[in-house]
Amino acid sequence: MNTENINSLSQIDPDYIKIGVIVFIIILVMFFLFTILRNVLAYRLKNKIIDKGLPESQVRAILQNDNSQYVNIKWFAILLGTGIGLFIVKLSQPLGIHSFAIMAVSISISFLSYHLYLQRKTT
């Protein structure tokens, strides 16, 4: 490792690293809570469907998840947006709070592109 890389790493303010870690932890906790909430609500929905005694064809239509075949495209869009964001952050040195804004915008654009892709495919 040459001294330029070491100097560029030492220029990052520790407060920005702490902010990044805190945001990452908050995202993980929210993802965990949303996953639990989704599973609980899906369980309750399935129980109500069983209690109603709906025909199997209607149950399949209600519980069908059409977007499961596009999971690879979703992750491609997210990782591509993250990579582009990191590239732009690298070009806009020195690192600062604008780096988080660049990453947020690039990931948001990747989610928007995935959403538009799904709309085009389903219609």
Image (tube, rainbow, N blue to C red):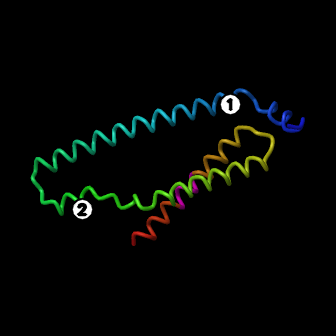
The total number of labels drawn is 2
Where in the figure is residue 14, as x and y percent of width and height?
72, 27
Q: Which mark is residue 77?
A: none
- Residue 77 position in % (x across, y down): 56, 57
Q: Quadrant of residue 54?
A: bottom left
Q: Which mark is residue 17?
A: 1
Of tags 2 and 1, the one toward the viewer is: 2
- Looking at the rendering, which quadrant does residue 122 occupy? bottom left
Where residue 61 is drawn, which disc sits there?
A: 2
- Please tell me which residue is depicted at 84% across the width and 38% down the height of the picture: 5
Judged by its main secondary structure, the magenta piece is helix
Instruction: Please report the bounds of the magenta region as a residue range.
Output: 108-113
Question: Quick one: which residue is furthest to the front in this view?
Answer: 1
- Mark 2 residue crowding within 10 angstroms, few (<14) / some (14–19) / many (20+): few
Is 111 covered by the magenta stretch? yes
Q: Dot 1, how many residues are within 10 Å of its Cα: few (below 14), some (14-19), or many (20+)?
A: few
Quadrant that contains the N terminus: top right
